[in-house]
Amino acid sequence: EEETIAFKFEPQEVAAFGSTVVAEGCGLGALWVHAWTVEPEGVITQVREYFNTSLTVARVGADSPASSSDDHDRSTHCLPVWQSRLHRRARKSLPGLVLAI
């Protein structure tokens, strides 16, 4: 008879950035990050799961347009607002990923 081990969702860290919520934890030999988008009414509209990945959440925005309306006169910046920490526990190199919000 095969024994089934259940995955327990026990976040070690939870953070929110506007409508995006991020939770990070570990279990069963895996590090995980879950990210979900929540509407103002509290409805979850999107869920992402990342396993054994170092995740950085970055806010992307455009600077104010210059006096000209040409696209080349505008710049876009990417500001990191959160980075997973549990990947440091891994005894191996993990891929990195940026989640743009």
Image: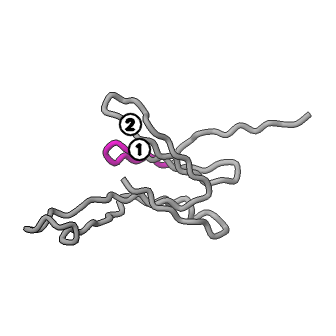
The earlier-in-sequence mark between 2 and 1 is 1
Q: In the drawing, what numbered circle is on residue 53?
A: none
The residue to which callout 1 is attached is 21
Question: Does 41 appear in magenta?
Answer: no
Dividing the picture into quarters, in which one does residue 72 lie? bottom left
Q: Amino acid at mark 2?
A: Val
Crowd band around label 2 with a 10 angstrom C-alpha radius: few (<14), some (14–19), many (20+): some
Quadrant in which the N terminus is drawn? top right
Residue 8 image point, x, y percent: 63, 39
Chain part drawn in magenta: 13-20
The residue to which callout 2 is attached is 38
Determine the main secondary structure of the stretch shown in magenta: strand
Secondary element type, mark 1: strand
At 21% from the left and 66% from the top, the residue drawn is: 71
The residue lying furthest to the left in this view is 67
CA gap between label 2 and label 1 equals 8 Å
Q: Amino acid at mark 1?
A: Val
Left or right: 79 in relation to 46 = left
Callout 2 touching callout 1 (CB < 8 Å): yes
Residue 34 image point, x, y percent: 52, 46
At 55% from the left and 47% from the top, the residue drawn is: 49
Dividing the picture into quarters, in which one does residue 89 lie? bottom right
Residue 99 image point, x, y percent: 44, 56
The residue lying furthest to the right in this view is 1
Left or right: 28 in relation to 54 = right
At 53% from the left and 50% from the top, the residue drawn is: 33
Say if 51 sits above or below 62 in the image: above
